[in-house]
Image (cartoon, rainbow, N blue to C red):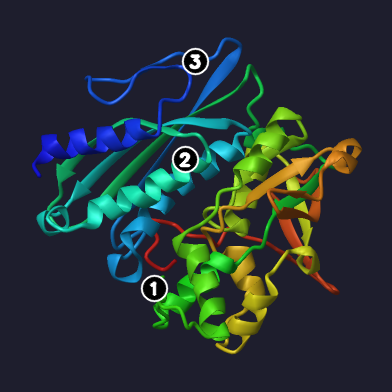
Amino acid sequence: MNEFEFIKHIRARAEERGAFSGLVRGIGDDAAVFNALAGSDVVVSTDLLVEDVDFRLANTRADLLGHKALAVSLSDIAAMGARPRWALLSLGVPEAVWNSGFLDNFYDGFFKLAARYGVTLIGGDVSRAPDKVVIDSILIGETPKAGAVFRSGARPGDHIFVTGFLGDAAAGLRLIERGAQLQQPSQEAKTDEARRLDYLLLRHLQPEPRVGWGLLLGEQQLATAMIDISDGLSSDLNHLCAESKVGALIDAACIPIDPLVTEITGRRALDPLMLALHGGEDFELLFTVASENVGLLPRRVDGVSVCRIGEITSEPGRVRVTEKDRTWNLEGGGFDHFNLKT
């Protein structure tokens, strides 16, 4: 199909899922129109994914990439304590990709995740790229007036929490770099080892945004500051502390590391703690809570638990880690798009 037939095709797929309340006009005009809810603030996030920088087509599937394109933006909206509402998606693809079944499968993954969180695709663009796939994902969310959670609200004495496990996605990426491949869904007789490997690979290829936790922390005003862990705990904790003009002290023994990561990476001479500290793309939430509100936190949301890993200090810019009788400064060591040594 040509470009205009493709847009008509995607419009039909988006409309199959029904319009989310507040949408006046979606795909089909020069711009989308929606009504923001009275008494709400609009939250907007954008993410750019570039082939051979943020992903490799040889290591993933089109549907997983479609899922991830939306998941990374959902994670940003969750980190603001907001509810995701509308998405815009623009793609640049080489001619060979355009003429394959890639795009339909890509949108399969995108729409499947969008349906889980009531997100409506309301626009975007498509163009031919010279030789690499480029994906631009924009997500619009809403939060009660003045209810967004920023990185700048942490105060000395606040407790530091993270959702889920840290280091899973980095472990999955390291395994891919060492030749591990995701088994096809049709392969029924997977060994236990293959299933365990697939789990870690999918933590990198098909991340799960913590939308439920983000909504709870925002709506109940429990988080004083929040950020999603996309670049790595070391980088993102430093970002949060810099914005809040505070420091932090975390306990290495409290960092939640999946026993599966410890087992599998240990056999491959990879350090689970370093993966948890510096590995990116877990898309877990890192947040701070005032002492008096810690008891109000639920143990789990959507089956995902939280762990207290440390405390905010009054030493601006000083982020430290304790491990047994040793303490060291934690410098940002996560992913940097323009640092070729990362």
User: Which mark is in front, 2 or 1?
Assistant: 1
Mark 1 is on which residue type? Ser
Q: Residue at x 13, y 37 (%)?
A: 5
Say if mark 3 contacts mark 2, CB within 8 Å.
no
Residue placed most toward the observer, 286 or 107: 107
Residue at the disc numbered 2: 115
Q: Amino acid at mark 3?
A: Ala
Residue at (12% x, 39% y) in the render: 3
* Quadrant in the picture for the N terminus: top left
Q: How packed is label 2: few (under 14 Cα within 10 Å), some, or many (20 or more)?
A: few
Q: Position of residue 334 (x, y in %)?
A: 53, 60
Q: Tell me if 136 is positioned left or right of 127 in this view.
A: right
Nearer-the-camera pick, 340 or 179: 179
Q: Is residue 230 above or below residue 323?
A: above
Q: Is residue 330 left or right of residue 248?
A: left
Q: Which residue is mark 3?
A: 36
- The answer to whether residue 338 is visible is no
**How busy is the neighbourhood of tag 3: few (under 14 within 10 Å), some, or many (20 plus)?**
some
Tell which circle, 3 or 1, labels the residue nearer the N-terminal end. Answer: 3
Numbered label tally = 3
Residue 291: x and y in percent read 89, 40
Secondary structure beneath dot 1 equals: loop
